[in-house]
Image (cartoon, rainbow, N blue to C red):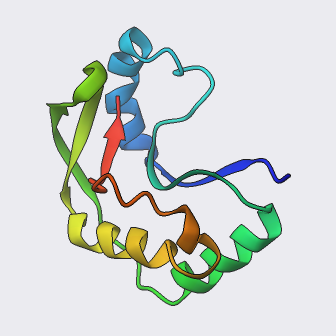
Amino acid sequence: MPAHRAVIVPTPPEADADLADIRRRVDAQYNSVPSHLTLVFPHRVRSDALLRHVDTIAGARRPIQVQLAGFAGCQNAWLFARVTRGNDDLIALHDHLYTGTLAAALDRTSIFVPHVTV
């Protein structure tokens, strides 16, 4: 059985520096998981198949300009840095990634809201 894999976009160093102090205080995964935006949530898929799929989908798209601003709370007391620029493009990329190899992995019970978990 393949290991759980996810597709993430690491936050750029300048955003990570802004979030680091908050994450250090409130995020239990601060030392083990870098600050990031998740596009595909953990799913059991082979690495080679996932890499090919992501390369095909993402390689055909133009770069996405993303801006974070402000925070929002969420269920289970999570704190999210909100995406204020690039939101629609990230949603489109997320939706496109959940085709082909990942089609069966899409959770249709939740709505994808681009964010960086703090």
Q: Could you tell me residue 47's position as x and y percent?
A: 79, 62
Q: Could you tell me residue 3's position as x and y percent?
A: 78, 47
Residue visible at 65% across and 76% down in the picture: 101
Q: Hey, which residue is sitting farthest bottom in the picture?
A: 60
User: What number of labels is visible?
Assistant: 0
Q: Could you tell me residue 13's position as x and y percent?
A: 45, 42
Judged left or right of residue 19, residue 39 is: right
Q: Hey, which residue is sitting farthest top in the picture?
A: 25
Q: Is residue 40 above or below residue 61?
A: above
Judged left or right of residue 82, residue 92 is: right
Residue visible at 61% across and 74% down in the picture: 54
Judged left or right of residue 36, residue 103 is: right
Between 16 and 39, the residue placed more toward the observer is 39
Judged left or right of residue 83, residue 112 is: right
Residue visible at 59% across and 82% down in the picture: 100
The quadrant the C terminus occupies is: top left
> Would you identify the image quadrant in which residue 70 lies?
top left
Between 11 and 94, the residue placed more toward the observer is 94
Residue visible at 31% across and 56% down in the picture: 112
Q: Hey, which residue is sitting farthest right in the picture?
A: 1
> Would you identify the image quadrant in which residue 51 lies?
bottom right
Q: Is residue 27 above or below residue 67?
A: above
Q: Is residue 70 above or below residue 106?
A: above
> Would you identify the image quadrant in which residue 76 lies?
top left
